[in-house]
Image (spheres, helix red, strand yellow):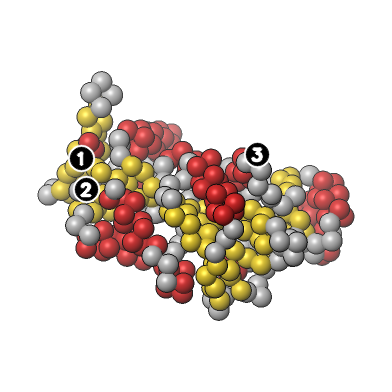
Amino acid sequence: MNILIIGNAKDIHAKHLKQALIKAGATVDYFDTHLFPSQLRMSWQPHSQAGTIKFDRNRQLDIKDIHSVFWRNFSGVGVHYLDDSSQQNIALKDSISALRTLIKAIPSRWVNSWDAYEFHKEKPIQLYTVKTLGVRIPDTLITNNSEEVISFANAYKQVIFKPVYGGAHTQKLTESLLESKRLELALSISPVTLQEYVPGTNIRSYVIGKSVFSAEIRSHCLDFRSDQTAELIPVELPKNIQQQCQDIAKALYLEWTAIDWRYNHDGEYIFLEANPSPMFLHFEKQTGFPITEELVNLLMR
């Protein structure tokens, strides 16, 4: 059974999962996309759907022989620098197009798919999609209009802000950040996501196929990801919230995900985000949940 992991051995999660899959009897290759086109060789024929991935002189796979693919860390392509910027741009676009084509052509189980990856890049649409399921989300504004920022900030007791795409931790919106010149400069560089601050408890739910594992995250930090001392307490979510986890994963094209909730003082679960490639080793170690085992089963099914 051939399984690919998008990523490489520098990622401890990719390395850990590869070892677990090999132990379970699978043959596993890293599919490090940054090595394409300089080292990885790939081919595909639209008329016959035949395709191959050549990792090195001794290792080549027909795409029809790939059982499943685990999306851990997508690093784009690695095109050599060219003095001619026009040729550089053509080489980059051709490489990305060929890579995307092959990714979509591999007729395997994807955990998770290109569609899920693309959807995750538009987080505001992710929030809207989840809301249409009847799940509560925080009041949210995406903008680079300073007047809208001021109006939103005045409408709530406390507001937090974070990047639209991601890549930085959540912070509180303070009076100093609303100073006119500072605000205009920041918004001329990039838009921002603003949300009402929801007091309560952090809950993270890992959804793997039909399984849901959840834990309360006890932390004094606004964004628990920055807290190395955060305490993880396993919890059993109500059946309706577990079903919402499944519904959210399906709506966002996710075979597996980590969903972040805020459990407020009124006993409501407010959806914050669903990550398509979450870290899991620390969570698994602290809670004892069989996340690795479930992922291996999902990929080898």
Q: Residue at x 54, y 73 (%)?
A: 233
Question: Local crowd at mark 3 within 10 Å, few (<14), some, or many (≥20)?
Answer: few
Residue 143 lies left or right of residue 96; in this view the side is: right
| Discs 1, 2 touching: Cβ within 8 Å | yes
Quarter residue 122 falls in = top right
Q: Are marks 3 and 1 in contact (CB under 8 Å)?
A: no
Task: Return the residue nearer the eye: 109 or 145.
Answer: 109
Q: Earlier in the sequence, mark 3 or mark 1?
A: 1
* Count of marks overlaid on the render: 3
- Reply above or below: 40 against 290: above
To which residue does mark 3 refer? 132
SS assignment at label 2: strand
Label 1: few (<14), some (14–19) or many (≥20) C-alpha neighbours in 10 Å: some
Is residue 284 visible in the rendered image? The answer is yes
Mark number for residue 95?
none
Left/right placement of residue 166 relative to residue 295 reads: right
Residue 2 is marked as 2
Which element type, helix, strand or loop, lies under badge 3?
loop
Q: Earlier in the sequence, mark 3 or mark 2?
A: 2
Q: Is residue 96 left or right of residue 202?
A: left
Q: Amino acid at mark 2?
A: Asn
User: Could you say which is closer to the camera, residue 201 or residue 89?
Assistant: 201
Measuring from the top left, give residue 217's x and y in whole percent. 58, 70
Determine the residue located farthest toward the top in the rendered image. Answer: 47
* 3D distance between C-alphas at marks 3 and 1: 38 Å
The kind of residue on which mark 1 rests is Asp
**In the image, what residue type sits under mark 3?**
Thr
Above or below: residue 77 compared with residue 284:
above
Q: Is residue 213 toward the left or the right of residue 185 in the image? A: left
Q: Which residue appears at 20% of the width and 48% of the height?
A: 1
The residue labelled by disc 1 is 65
